[in-house]
Amino acid sequence: MLEVSHYTDCTSTLVERLTQAVREVRPDNRLSISLDGIDFLSLPELTALLSAMQSARRRGITTDIVGLSSSLESLLTLAGVTFH
């Protein structure tokens, strides 16, 4: 599980960790991304998260977003993310 709260102080580090996490997960597996403790994502952070999810999907990796605040869930829903 990738805990995003450890990387929100630097967008480039967040992008790097998300990219690395997607590369390390084998196709047909699951990548869990924790947003626990985060109430806000900047536009670059949101873009990085959505891009990583799209890259994972192209590789056949299921992405789970866990620990969502209600505000982030609303934001991600507006961005087109569906939750099961």
Image: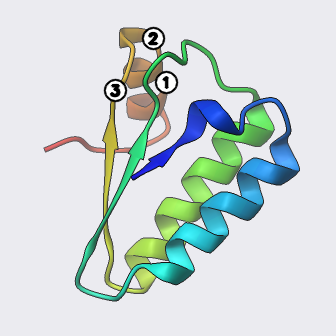
Q: Position of residue 37 (x, y in %)?
A: 49, 16
Seen at 45% across and 11% down, the residue is: 71
**Amino acid type, label 2:** Ser
Secondary structure of residue under mark 1: helix
**Sooner in the amino-acid sequence: mark 1 or mark 3:** 3
How crowded pointer 2 is (Cα within 10 Å; few <14, some 14-19, many 20+) is rated as few
In this view, which residue lies farthest toward the left?
Answer: 84
Q: Are marks 3 and 2 in contact (CB under 8 Å)?
A: no
Position of 48 relative to 18 (above/below): above
Position of 30 relative to 72 (above/below): below
Q: Mark 2 = which residue? A: 71
Q: Mark 1 = which residue? A: 75
Q: Is residue 14 toward the left or the right of residue 71 in the image? A: right
Secondary structure of residue under mark 3: loop
How crowded pointer 1 is (Cα within 10 Å; few <14, some 14-19, many 20+) is rated as some
Seen at 40% across and 19% down, the residue is: 74
Seen at 73% across and 32% down, the residue is: 8
**Amino acid type, label 1:** Leu
Q: Mark 3 = which residue? A: 67
**Amino acid type, label 3:** Gly
- Name the foreground residue: 77 vs 36: 36
Q: Is residue 40 toward the left or the right of residue 82 in the image? A: right
The residue mark sitting in front, 3 or 2, is: 3
Distance from Cα at disc 3 to Cα at disc 2: 12 Å
Position of 19 relative to 12 (above/below): below
Distance from Cα at disc 1 to Cα at disc 3: 14 Å
Position of the C terminus, as image quadrant, is top left
Q: Position of residue 49 (x, y in %)?
A: 59, 49
Q: Position of residue 54 (x, y in %)?
A: 50, 67
Q: Are marks 1 and 2 in contact (CB under 8 Å)?
A: yes
